[in-house]
Image (cartoon, helix red, strand yellow):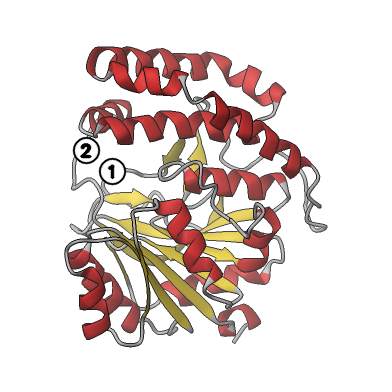
Amino acid sequence: MSAARRAPVAVVVVSWNGREHLAGCLASLAGLERTPAETVVVDNASTDGTVAMVEERFPWVRVRALSENTGFCRANNVGIAATSSPFVLVLNPDTRLTAGFLEHLLPAFEAPDVGIAAGKLLRFDGRTLDSCGQRLARSRQPIDRGYGRLDRGRYERDEDVFGACGAAALYRRAALESIADPGARVFDEAFFAFYEDLDVAWRMRRLGWRAVYRHRAVGYHARGGTARGNRAVRRFAALLGRSAAVRYHIAKNRYLAILRNDTPGAYLRALPFVLARDVATAAILLATAPGVLIRLARSGPLFRAALAKRALDAARPRLQTDRGGHPAGDDR
């Protein structure tokens, strides 16, 4: 057995009023061939009895109950700080893992420059793909490979990817620590939620860490049902169905990720695609939620802070085993 496969794994699950899904998620963890050494549920002030359910039905799980909804990023930082295992699986409560999920992901970390491992996530129908790792679109949003398509074997090979969907991402702790902001904040808490998985992967890549996809590591994710069709249409339809607060975070966080991570040359090469996305998003928001545009216009301090964090990132030491080259999966 490889050293990576023997290494302890911590699981961090952030929950907010997700009691019913969470029970299935934790039950699937109990059925893993590779039992997690630590499992922490960070609850964002749920009102559906989540904490009581976990404490009653899953006594082996540690619960960190927060007094308010601090967002996905802050809650994950709390959970990661509460663990010590060399690998950390960040998991959404609406996921379920097959028994061999960790067994198939952990050997990827035998390569010393692998910081992230992603498996194949299917919808609960067992036929529709949810994510086979992420790539970075030229318009600068994360694209979950295979999203919404029938699983016809296209992603039945192991390969490098840009990053992992935050619903089920396995991280090397040393890679997380290499990008952490002051206070051991791995996830940028200015994001609150959405795009945080892209930002973490992007910051890791800038330091030389790789992300890989392992197709035999299979899990299930309830997101989005089984709708299929044109990818762009589906994404804009999903945007329309969200609250104004969520739309604000999605729009804001795309710019935060760009400001913190993109290079001038790569951004200029992608500019036509970035502008096309900006115009389409602005038109939708103007017609349906103009208050979001006003809120974005008032977010200057957050954007300036992203540039300050970028300067801190530039001083971080790069991984010595970095092999150079462009990020895998970046459309150029």
Residue 120 in the image: state x and y as whole percent.
Answer: 39, 58
| Label of residue 228 in the image | 2
Quadrant of res 251:
top left
Residue 295 in the image: state x and y as whole percent.
Answer: 39, 23
Label 2 sits on a secondary structure element that is: loop
Question: What residue did someone put label 1 on?
Answer: 149
Q: CA distance from mark 2 to mark 1?
A: 6 Å
Q: Residue at x 34, y 23 (%)?
A: 292
Q: Amino acid at mark 1?
A: Arg
Q: Earlier in the sequence, mark 2 or mark 1?
A: 1
Q: Is residue 258 visible?
A: yes
User: Around disc 2, counting alpha carbons within 10 Å, would you say few (fewer than 14), some (14 to 19), or many (20 or more)?
Assistant: some
| Outermost residue to the front | 67
Label 1 sits on a secondary structure element that is: loop
Q: Residue at x 42, y 57 (%)?
A: 156
Q: Is residue 24 left or right of residue 29?
A: left
Task: Judge whether 70 appears above or below 21 on screen.
Answer: above
Q: Residue at x 38, y 17 (%)?
A: 294
Task: Judge whether 94 appears above or below 148 on screen.
Answer: below
Q: Amino acid at mark 2?
A: Arg
Q: Is residue 165 visible?
A: no
Residue 211 in the image: state x and y as whole percent.
Answer: 59, 54
Q: Is residue 139 left or right of residue 146?
A: right
